[in-house]
């Protein structure tokens, strides 16, 4: 792990200059090179914004992606901890906490608000996330299989939520047709659960502010009710 903060201005170009100028006056930035990391990461804590890069290659798109996560924090998006601490349902808690679903869900929500700005900066949708979505009929079979056995039920719902949100939030246009096809198949497995997830995703997309807590807890309550009934 190497502190390369003195090089951080090299990651600023005409595309991200404005947002960088705004954020550097609000936070003390650290840029860390850590080859043991799998992907870029960003976080803010006590006025310090830290961006971690797994490569020494200057990637404007990846640096900007992390800047946008920090920008959402600056604008006041609800914290992940607020969502987790707000969960009241015993059944929904077990499902949402398993397999680190909450950080994944939170990331999807952040990306939904970030993507428009990212595109307006002139970056390609192909570079927005590190990996293109990989989903096929085996994933459908696996979800159905998990729902078949009672002892795998929580895992089934966990996978169902994560995969549904992943497919709903694809940004590469040429992938959207394939993802819509698989979403139709997922919907048929548990239509009522699918609607709960879809309503949550749509409400957040249409929200005019960054109060994710209210929308998430409404989703969590409906999820808990569904789990009790099913």
Image: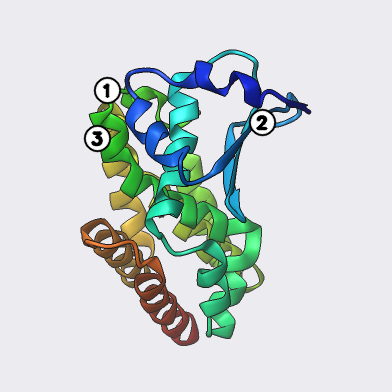
**Sequence-wise first label, 1 or 2:** 2
For this view, does 172 lie left or right of residue 147?
left
Tell me the SS state at disc 3.
helix
Q: Can you tell which quarter of the image residue 220 is in? A: bottom left
Image spot of residue 37 (x, y percent)? 70, 31
Q: Can you tell which quarter of the image residue 122 is in? A: top left
**Sequence-wise first label, 3 or 2:** 2
Mark identifier at residue 177:
3
Looking at this rendering, what residue extends furthest in the front direction?
A: 25
Q: How is the image coloured?
A: rainbow
As measured in the structure, the alpha-carbon distance from the residue carrying label 1 to the one carrying label 2 is 25 Å
Question: What residue does disc 1 label?
Answer: 122
User: Disc 3 or disc 2, which is closer to the eye?
Assistant: 2
Instruction: Tell me the quarter of the image containing the N terminus.
Output: top right
Name the residue rendered at 38%, 39% in the picture: 22
Name the residue rendered at 36%, 75% in the picture: 214
Tell me the SS state at disc 2.
loop
Mark identifier at residue 72:
none
Mark identifier at residue 38:
2
**Sequence-wise first label, 1 or 3:** 1
Q: Residues within 10 Å of mark 3 (few under 14, many from 20)?
A: few
In the rendered view, would you say 39 is above or below 138?
above
Tell me the SS state at disc 1.
loop
Image spot of residue 145 (x, y percent)? 55, 57
Image spot of residue 6 (x, y percent)? 64, 22
In the rendered view, would you say 24 is above or below 35?
below
Name the residue rendered at 41%, 59% in the picture: 77
Q: Can you tell which quarter of the image residue 31 is in? A: top right
User: Disc 1 or disc 3, which is closer to the eye?
Assistant: 1
As measured in the structure, the alpha-carbon distance from the residue carrying label 3 to the one carrying label 2 is 29 Å
For this view, does 204 lie left or right of residue 54?
left
Q: Residues within 10 Å of mark 2 (few under 14, many from 20)?
A: few
């Amino acid at each position: 792990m190497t502190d390369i903060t003195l090089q951080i201005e090299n990651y600023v170009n005409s595309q991200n200059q404005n947002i960088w100028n705004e954020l550097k006056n609000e936070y003390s930035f650290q840029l860390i090179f850590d080859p043991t990391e799998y992907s870029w990461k960003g976080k803010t804590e006590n006025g310090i914004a830290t961006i971690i890069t797994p490569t020494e290659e200057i990637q404007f798109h990846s640096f900007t992606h992390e800047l946008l996560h920090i920008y959402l924090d600056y604008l006041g998006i609800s914290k992940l901890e607020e969502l987790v601490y707000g969960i009241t349902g015993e059944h929904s808690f077990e499902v949402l906490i398993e397999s680190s679903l909450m950080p994944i869900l939170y990331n999807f929500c952040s990306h939904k608000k970030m993507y428009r700005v990212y595109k307006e900066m002139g970056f390609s949708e192909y570079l927005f996330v590190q990996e293109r979505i990989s989903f096929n009929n085996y994933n459908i079979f696996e979800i159905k299989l998990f729902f078949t056995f009672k002892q795998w039920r929580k895992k089934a719902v966990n996978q169902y939520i994560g995969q549904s949100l992943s497919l709903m939030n694809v940004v590469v246009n040429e992938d959207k047709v394939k993802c819509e096809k698989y979403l139709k198949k997922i919907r048929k497995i548990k239509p009522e659960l699918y609607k709960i997830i879809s309503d949550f995703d749509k409400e957040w997309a249409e929200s005019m502010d960054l109060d994710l807590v209210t929308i998430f807890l409404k989703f969590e309550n409906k999820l808990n009710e569904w789990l009790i009934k099913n």
